[in-house]
Image (cartoon, coloured by chain):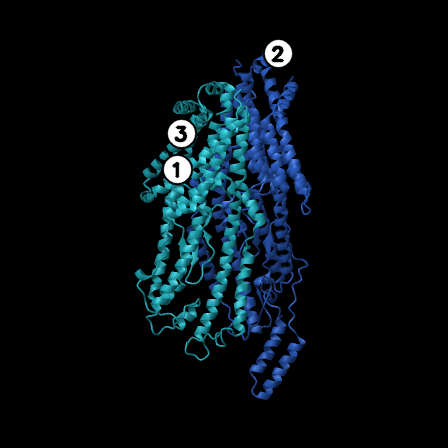
Amino acid sequence: MIWKIAKKEFLLNLMTFKFAVGAVACIVLTAVFMPILAADYRQRLETYNGNVADNEAEIRNVIVYRNIRHTIYRPPAVLSAFSAGLEKQLAGSAKIELEKVPELSVTQRGGNPYLPILAVFDQSLIFKIIISILALLVAYDMVSGEREQGTLKLVLSGTIARHQVLLGKLIAGLITLSVPVIIIFVVGLVVLLSYPMVALSGSDWIRVGLMLVASLAFTVVMYQFGLLFSSLARRSAISMVLGLFIWIIFAIVIPNASVHLATQFRPLESPEKRDSRVISLKDDLANELGNVKVDSSGSLITSDERDAFGGYYAKRRDIYWLNAEQKLNSLTIPIKLRYADKSLSIEQSNLNSFFAQKDLARMLSFVSPISTYENTMAVLAGTDITSFVDFINQVRAHRNEVVEYIRSKTDNFSSASFFAICSEEESAEFTRLFLQVHQAKDEQAKASAEQALKEWERENPVKAEPLNLQDFPWFKYRPSPAADLRKAMPDLAALLIMNVVLFGMCFAAFARYDVR
Amino acid sequence: MFFQIVRKEILESLLSVRFALSILFTIILFAASTFFFVERYREQSEDYWRRHNENLSGFREQTDQLCNIAFYEQHIYRKPKVLSLCASGAEQRLPGHFTFDGFDIGLPQIVGQSNFTLPRFGDLDWAWIISLVLSFTVFVFAYDCVCGEREKGTLRLILAGATPRATLLLAKYAGLILTLAIPLFLGLFISMIILIASGTESVGFIRWESVVVVVLTSFLYLSIFVFLGIFVSARTSNSSNSMAALLFIWVVLLLLIPSLGRVISDRFYHAATTEEFERAKSQARKSIDDRFYAGAYGSKASGTAPNRDDPDVDPPGRARYTVDETAAINRVVDAQYNRMLAQAEAGRAFIYISPAVVYRRICEVMAGTGIDRSKSLYRQIKRYQQNLREYILSEDQGDLGSLHLLFDDKARVTGWTTISHKSVNFDTVPKFQERDLGLGESLRLAVWDIGVLALFNLVFFAAAFVSFLRYDVR
C-alpha cells in the first residue's frame, strides 16, 4: 500500500506546475552556467600549470643553495564548480624561505581587493536555493492540502495506517526530488568532463557520489520540513507561509547572522597587539644576530652576480671574506631558523583566534540544514578551509625537507657552496695572486703579478653552473581524500540525523492530525 | 469604494499569520542589525581616530623643515559613517587605507585584518533587510491577492458590482503597500530608537534628508515586487502556482543574478596579478633608466656628490629624471587601480538587471558608502597630493637659498637644498579632509538608478494592469 501511495503522489507531483518550473529552472541553470564554471576552472588550471612550470624552470637555474626560494602553488580543485568554498578567497601559494615558515594567511589572494563586493556562484547554490524551495513547495500541501480537498479523510477511513500514508508521501517526495537532483549532477558532470583539461580521479568520483548522497539527504530534510508544517497546519496556505519563513531563516538569516554573531562574541586579536609581538621578536632576532661577531676586516674584494628568485651569489672572492662569510652563515642561519619557528607560533596564535571565530560561526549555523549542506559540499569538493590548512601543512613539511637538504649539502650552512661558486682552494689561490699584484714593490713586479693573475683566471674561469638537484625533495601536493571524507562525515551524519528526527516529528504531528 | 477595498485588504492582512510572522521577523532583524552596528561603529570610530591622530602627529613633526613635508608617508583611513547603518556598501571588505607622500600613492589597502577563513556575506544593514527579507515578505502577501480571491469566489462577487477593475487593482496595490509600511516603519523606528539610545556621538550629524530618500526609495523598490506579485497572481489560476512562479522570480532576481557578477568579471576581465603589476613597475622604471643612460637628462644627471656646487652634479637634470621615473610608476599604479575598478564594476554592471542591486546602489550613494566612496576618496587624495606639492613650492619661493626643485629623492632634495630647510607653521600646511558629497550631488548620482526603479515599476504596473483587466474571474 505504501508503494501505491508513493506512486500516486509521485505521478501527481510530476504533473504540477511548481515541479515543472523548479526542475526546468535547475536544469537550465546547470546547462547554462556549468560551461562558464568549467571554463573558469580551466583558466585557473592553466594559470597554475604556467606558474608551476615557470617556478620549476627557475629553480633548475639556481646557482647556490641559499637562493632556493621557490614558490609552491596549490592546484585548483576540480570539483570547485560544484562548490566554490573559499577557492575564490584564497589563492593557495606559499614561498619557501629559510627565514620564514609558511602559514595559512600567506594563501590569501593578493589580487583585486574590490572583487569581494561580488558574490560567488557555484552549483551548490542551485541546490541550496532552488531545490530547497522546490522541496518545500512539493511538500507544503501534502497533508493540509489533502485535508482541504477531503481526500485525506477518505484515505484514512480505510484500513491504511497513518504511518503507511506518511511513509508513502515521504518516498514519493524522495523519488520526485531525486529526478532534478540526479539530472543536475549528470548534466553538470557531462559538461565538466567535456572540457579537455578536466579529468576526475577515482577519489573524485567517490567525492561526487557522496555529494549526490548529501544533496539527496539535504533535499529530503527540506521536504520533511514542508511535510511537518503541512501536518501541523490545517490550511495549506499557512503551511506554505511557515515553510517559506523557515526557508528564509535557514537560507539567509542563519548563515549571515552566525558570522556576525561569531565576529561579535569572539573578536580577533588586535593587529596592533600581534604586530607588537612580531616587532619584539624581530628586535630579539636583531639583537641575537648582532651578538654574532665574525671578523671580516681582512676582506679584499666583492664580486656578486644575480641568481634565480632575485638572489645573488658570490662569484670570486678572497679567502678572508669567504671564511668570514662561511662562519657567519654557520652561526646566523640556525638562529634565523629558530626565529622562523618562533614567528610561526605568533602567527599560529593569531590564526587560532580566526579559527575560534570560524568554529563558533559554524556551530551557530549548524541549526540550518542549508549551512550544514554547504559545509559538506565544500569539504567534499576540497575547497573548504581545511583543504587549505592541509595544503599549508604539506608545504611546511616540504620546507623542512628543503632546509634539511640544504643543511646536508652545505655542511650545516657552513660550506662555500651555500652562497658562492668558488671553492676555498680557488679563493686562497686567487687571494695570493691578488695580493701579489697589490703588494708589488715595483712596476715590473706588478706587471708580472697581473700577468700571473690573468693567466690563472684564464685557466680557472668562473663556472656558474646550476645546482645538481637530482636528489632535491620536489613538492607534490597530495590531497587526502580519506581525511576529507572523514571531515565531511559529521556534517553528512548531521543531515541524516536531521532526516530521522524530522521524520519522527512528522509522524508525531500526523498521528495527531485532525482530518476533519 | 477605493478606500473601502483598501481598508478591507489591510484588515485582512493584519489578522493573518504571515503578517504576524513578518512583523516579528522584521523587528528582530532591524533590532539585531542596529545592535551589531552600534558595537562595530564604536570600535571602528576609536580605531579611526587613534590612527588619524597618529598620522597627524607624525605629519606635525615634519614641519621643522619644509622639504620633509613632501617625504612624509601619510596614512589616510576611511572614516566610519553612521549612515552605513542604512547601507554599509561592503566597506569592511573594501580597501580603506591609503598610503601616500607628496609624489606617489600606493594601491589602496584593506583596513585592519579580517577573518579570511569565514565565508563572505552581505552586511546586516537596512538595505540588506529591505532588499532581501522585505521583498520576500511582499511576495508572501501578494501571491494570492488575485488568484486567491478567484479561488474563494470573492473576486467574482466584487466585480459583479459597479467597482471597475482599475479601482480594484489600485486598491489592492495601495492595501499591500500600506500593509508593508507597518513592518518597515516599525523596524526603522526601532532601529533609530536603539541608535539614539546607544549614545553614539555622531547621531547628531546624520543627514536626515538622505534617510528620507532611502526610505522613499525603499517604497519604490518594494512597489516593484507588489506589482510583480499582482501581475503573477493575475496570470495564474491558483495560488500555489502563483507562489511557485514568484519564488522562482525572487530567487533569480535577488540571489542568482547578483551571484553571477564574480563569474562574469573573472571570466571576461583581467586585472594584473601582483607579480604582473610588479613587473610593469620594473619595466616603467627600466624605460626611464634607459633614457637616463642614453643621456636624455644630461651627462651629469647621474652625479650624486653631496655638494650641489660640485661640477659633476646637475640638480635640474637629476630632478627631471626622478620626476619622470615617479610619473612613469604612477601611471602604472593608476592603470592597475583603474583596471581593478573596471573589473569590479563590470561584474556589477552585469548584475544591474536585478532591482536589488540598483536599490542597494542608491542606498550606498545616499549613505555615502561603498565602492563609489572608495573611488571618490582616492580621487580626493590625489587632488590633495597635488595641493600639498603646490603649497611646498609656493612656500619654497621665499627661500632664496633653495633651488626650487621638488622630486622624489630625499637624499638629494635635502642634501642639495633643492627645497627650503626652513620650518613652517603646521596650521598653514594643507591637511587631508574627506569631503562628503552634498545631498544634491548624491541625488544627481542616484537619479539614474531611481529612474531605473521607476521604470521597473512602470513596466510591472502595466503588466499587472493588462493582466488583471483580462483576468478570467470564473
Q: Label 1 sits on what residue type? A: Val
Colour for chain A in the figure: blue
The percent position of residue B93, horizontal first and vertical second, equals: 47, 47
Q: CA distance from mark 2 to mark 1?
A: 59 Å
In depth, the one of B9 and B253 nearer the eye is B9
Instruction: Tell me the element at label 2.
Output: loop
In depth, the one of A285 and B4 nearer the eye is B4
In depth, the one of A42 and B410 nearer the eye is A42
Q: CA distance from mark 3 to mark 1?
A: 14 Å
Query: Callout 2: few (<14), some (14-19), or many (20+) C-alpha neighbours within 10 Å?
Result: few
Q: CA distance from mark 3 to mark 2?
A: 51 Å
The percent position of residue B474, horizontal first and vertical second, equals: 53, 19
Q: Label 3 sits on what residue type? A: Leu
Query: Callout 3: few (<14), some (14-19), or many (20+) C-alpha neighbours within 10 Å?
Result: some
Q: Which residue is mark 1?
A: B215
Chain letter, disc 2 residue:
A
Chain letter, disc 3 residue:
B
Which mark, residue A159?
Answer: 2
Chain shown cyan: that is B
The percent position of residue B41, horizontal first and vertical second, equals: 38, 44
Respond whether the residues carrying marks 3 and 2 are from the same subunit: no
Instruction: Tell me the element at label 3.
Output: helix
Q: Quadrant of the N terminus of chain A?
A: top right
The percent position of residue B228, horizontal first and vertical second, equals: 50, 32
Q: For the residues carrying marks 3 and 2, which lies nearer the camera in this image?
A: 3
Q: Label 2 sits on what residue type? A: Thr
Please identify the quarter of the rendering in which residue A216 is found. top right
Please say whether residue B65 is visible from this viewpoint. Answer: no
Instruction: Tell me the element at label 1.
Output: helix
Q: Which residue is mark 3?
A: B178
